Amino acid sequence: MKVQQVKLVMSAVSAKQYPSDGYPEIALAGRSNVGKSSLINRLINRNRYARTSSTPGKTQTLNFYQINDEMYLVDVPGYGYARVSKADRAKFGEMIEEYLTTRKTLKGVVILVDGRHEPTDDDVSMYQYVQYYHLPTLVVATKMDKIPRSKWNKQESSIKKKLQFNQKDDFVFFSAPKNFGQEAVWNWIDAHTQL
Ligand code: GDP
């Protein structure tokens, strides 16, 4: 994808606010601080378009970024804030569920995990949830610049094992500062939106 134009067209909390123009969509999900904003900014070649969220508590909305006049990248709010209340967590769960289960134009989900560590229980739940709805999934292991290359294969195996990775899905290593992996992520997105 050659990104010529990016517009944040909607920050939605419910289905009636989703864009209605029918462009295919790819959602991006991951624990807060996993590097999701950094990945989105790399994908769209902007430095600070998607807000980086090292401080918890930003508004929990689904952000629809329209790319050219072709598709949407949908930024799903980060999960796993320790300080979020039970009520907020429930509301968040409903919002994600409504989106993933009803959105006809959703063609696939990119799930980010921190490449340095074993996936958390939240990561596993998210991956299994998306599996359950048969959505094609790309797992992106972030922050790989923090690990020597000699350990990448071992990390990949351990991440896949913990997630109970489905061989039909795909896996990419990524580093924002090294700008590594973004082309592979775009290739996957293109393959799943240009059917
Ligand atoms: P988000 O909460 O998932 O949107 O995560 P951010 O994109 O805001 O990143 C969280 C923190 O991790 C920030 O301090 C980023 O600079 C850092 N970070 C993100 N991606 C990478 C990466 O690929 N490598 C390294 N070393 N740091 C990263």
Image (cartoon, rainbow, N blue to C red):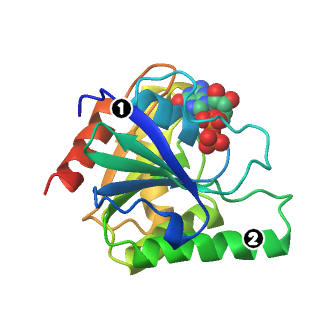
Find disc 2 in the rendering and name its residue.
Answer: 89
98 left or right, relative to 26: right
Residue 28: percent from left, percent from top: 47, 52
SS for dot 1 = loop
- Whether residue 128 is visible to the viewer of this picture, yes or no, is no
Q: Quadrant of residue 76?
A: bottom right
Image quarter of the N terminus: top left
Residue 68: percent from left, percent from top: 29, 36
Q: Quick check: 34 above or below 144?
A: below
Question: For the point 34% across and 56% down, which residue is it?
Answer: 25
For badge 1, the amino acid type reads Gly
- Tally of marks: 2
Question: For the point 38% across and 65% down, which residue is it?
Answer: 165
User: Which mark's residue is nearer the viewer, 1 or 2?
Assistant: 2
SS for dot 2 = helix
Residue at mark 1 to residue at mark 2: CA–CA distance: 32 Å
Residue 195: percent from left, percent from top: 13, 57
Q: Quadrant of residue 91?
A: bottom right
Label 1 CA crowd tier, 10 Å (few <14, some 14–19, many 20+): many
Which sits earlier in the primary sequence, circle 1 or circle 2?
A: 2
Q: Quick check: 140 above or below 85?
A: above
Q: Quick check: 153 above or below 126?
A: above
- What mark, if any, has residue 181 been given in the picture? 1
For badge 2, the amino acid type reads Arg
